[in-house]
Image: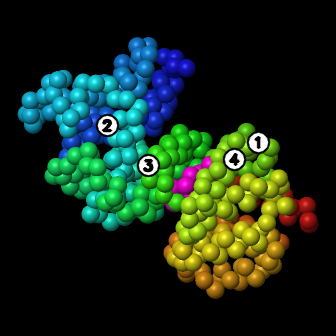
Amino acid sequence: MFPTNNDNELSHFTAHLFRENSGKMIAVLSKRFGIDKIDDVTDVVQDSFEAALTKWKYGNLPENPSAWLMQVAKNKMINKLKAANHQRVTLTDHFYGIDISSEPTETEIADSQLRLLFFFCKLELSPKKKILLTLYFLCGFGYAEIANALLMQEEAVKKTITRSKELLKSFHSTLEDENLLSQIHQEELYLILYLMFNEGYKTTRSANGLNTDLCYEAIRLTKLILSENNYAEAGALLALMFFNVARFPARIDEEKSWIPLKEQNRELWNKELILEGFYYLDLVQKKTTALNSYYLEALIASIHCSHSSYEQTDWRKIAFLYHQLEKLKPSSGTVVLNRMMAESHYEPASSLIQQIGERESFFMKGNPYLLYLCKAYLFQKDNQIHAALHFYQMALNLVKSVMDEKYIRLQMKKLLDTGSHSN
C-alpha cells in the first residue's frame, strides 16, 4: 500500500525503500559501471531517493518504486560519467559484457550483492574495516549504526569510510572475477552477515526495536552462500537466525517495550520458522563434526525453542554450551556473562556475583552496559534490592535505545514495588 500525500508517511515509506533497495542498487551499478566508481554510485543512489521524495510528494507514485529508483540511479550515473568526461557513455554501451540499459533481474541483483560482499572480504584491509565497508555500502547502515555494531566512535567510522572511498577509486577491478569466493576469508564473511542480522534483531535505527527487513535480508544472503558452497558455518548461522526470528512476535509488548524471555508467550513463537531452524541444524550435523561459534549459539537457541516453558528449560545444558563457546571466544566477556546467567538458575547468585567481582576488569573491557545488567539481575535474584537498583541505574546511564531505557525503567519499577510491599 502506497502512502498518502502526508510528508511523514512518505518519508517513512521512502526510508523503508532505502533499507530494502540501496544495497541492491549499489551492488548492481558497481557491477555494471566498475567497482572503482562505487563512490559515484553511492552518490547517485542517495540522489535518487532524494528525487523520489521530491517527485512522489505530489502523488506521482510509480507502479514499481524499486524499478523506478534503479532506473533513475542508472540514468544519473550515465549523466555523471558524461559530465566528468570519463568516457563516452550511451545506453547501448556494455560494461563487462552487461547491457547497462537492461533492467536487472532478481538473479543479477542477488549475484551482484554476493559479489560485492565477496569483494570487500578479499580486500587487504583489517577485518573490522572490511565489515565496516560492507555494512555501509551493501547493507545501507548509517554511521551511528556501524559505530554501535562495531563498538567504534562515530567519527572514526566516518574517517574510515572516507579513506576507503579514496582507496576504491584507484581499484580498477571487475566483480565478474569467478575466483572471488576462493580468495576471501570465510570467517569475515560470516561475521558480516551475523552483525547484519544482529542489527535487525535489536536495531539502533528506531524506537521499534526490530528491523525484520534487515534480518530477512541477512537470511537471504546467507542462504545464497549456503546453496553455492554448503559451508557448515552458513548452515549453522541460518539455524541461529531462524530460531531467533521465530521469537519476534513475542518479544515486544503493546507499550513498545522488550518482553523478557521468561515472560514471553511461547504460543506466539513461529513454529514453522523453528522447524526451518532445525532443518539447517540437522544439515550441519550431517556435514561436519567440527565446532564453530555459530553452531554452538544455534544449539543454545534450539534448546530455548524446544521447551514449552521457561521453567522447563535445560539450563545446565545451556551453561555447558556456553562453556564450550568460551573456549572458542576466550576474550568475550559477553559469552561468560551469558553462561553465568544460565548458571544462576541452579547456582547461588551470591557465588556468581563474587566470580564477576574477581574478573571485573575483564568484563569492563567488553560492554559495561551488559555487565551492569547482569549484576543487577544477579543482585535481584539474591534479594539485594538496593544493589540491584544501583546497577540498573548504571546500565541506564549507558543506554543507547528507547526500548532498552523502557525495559530498565520497568525492571526498576518492579523492584521498587517489591521493596515497598516487603516493608
Q: Which residue is mark 2?
A: 28
Q: Bin the neighbour count of mark 4 within 10 Å (Cα to Cα): few under 14, some 14-19, many 20 and up.
A: some
Q: Please report the residue visible at 31 percent of the width from the left and 60 percent of the height from the top.
A: 183
Q: Which residue is mark 4?
A: 275
Residue nearer the viewer, 238 or 140 = 238
Ranked by sequence position, the earlier of labels 4 and 1 is 1
In-image side of 327 versus 316 (left or right): left
Label 3, label 4: how many angstroms apart (C-alpha)?
A: 22 Å
Q: Helix or strand or loop: what does disc 1 sit on?
A: helix
Label 2, label 4: how many angstroms apart (C-alpha)?
A: 34 Å
Q: Nearer the viewer, mark 1 or mark 2?
A: 2
Give the x, y percent position of residue 137.
35, 46
Q: Helix or strand or loop: what does disc 2 sit on?
A: helix
In-image side of 53 versus 216 (left or right): left
Give the x, y percent position of residue 176.
26, 44
Q: Nearer the viewer, mark 4 or mark 1?
A: 4
Q: Amino acid at mark 1?
A: Leu
Q: Please report the residue visible at 36 percent of the width from the left and 50 percent of the height from the top.
A: 117
Q: Nearer the viewer, mark 3 or mark 4?
A: 3
Q: Helix or strand or loop: what does disc 4 sit on?
A: helix
Q: Amino acid at mark 2?
A: Val
Q: Amino acid at mark 4?
A: Leu
Q: Which residue is mark 1?
A: 268
Q: Is residue 43 visible?
A: no
Q: Nearer the viewer, mark 2 or mark 4?
A: 4
